[in-house]
Image (cartoon, rainbow, N blue to C red):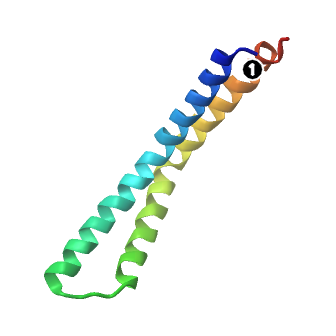
Amino acid sequence: MTTEAVTDMVAQGLYLVLEVSLPILLVSLAVGLIVSIFQTVTSIQEQTLTFVPKVIAIFLAIMFLGGWMMNEMVEYTQELWGSFSVYAHR
């Protein structure tokens, strides 16, 4: 296995991690920002107020995007295992 092959596998894996996790992180960021603005405007400084909406939003995002996320990971895994003979070549 060449250095280029390993670099390509790692790059594809890291890109997949970013691609799959980014929507969930953006949802969490948006909800956190909205709740923070709400807390600032109303002067409510309750720490648990940020936790519950984020958990609910992330749960809903996973419900809607979970199928797509799983398909992306399965495709990458199938591609990786399908080309295993190329990588295992001496």
Q: Residue at x 36, y 53 (%)?
A: 26
Name which residue lies at 16% across and 85% down: 42
Q: Amino acid at mark 1?
A: Gly
Instruction: Using the rendered view, name the quadrant where residue 4 is placed.
Output: top right
Above or below, 53 relative to 48: above
| Residue drawn at the location 28% of the way across and 87% of the way down | 45
Residue farthest toward the left in the current orientation of the protein: 41
Q: Quadrant of the C terminus?
A: top right
Residue 11: x, y in percent? Answer: 56, 28
Q: Nearer the viewer, residue 57 or 25?
A: 25
Left or right: 41 in relation to 78: left
Q: Is 68 left or right of 81, judged from the image as shown?
A: left
Q: Position of residue 35 (x, y in %)?
A: 27, 73
Q: Which sits in the foreground, 63 or 86?
A: 86
Where is residue 3? Give x, y as percent: 67, 18
For label 1, the SS is helix
Tell me the residue that label 1 is attached to: 82
Residue drawn at the location 60% of the way across and 21% of the way down = 8
Q: Residues within 10 Å of mark 1 (few under 14, many from 20)?
A: few
Residue 84 sits in quarter: top right
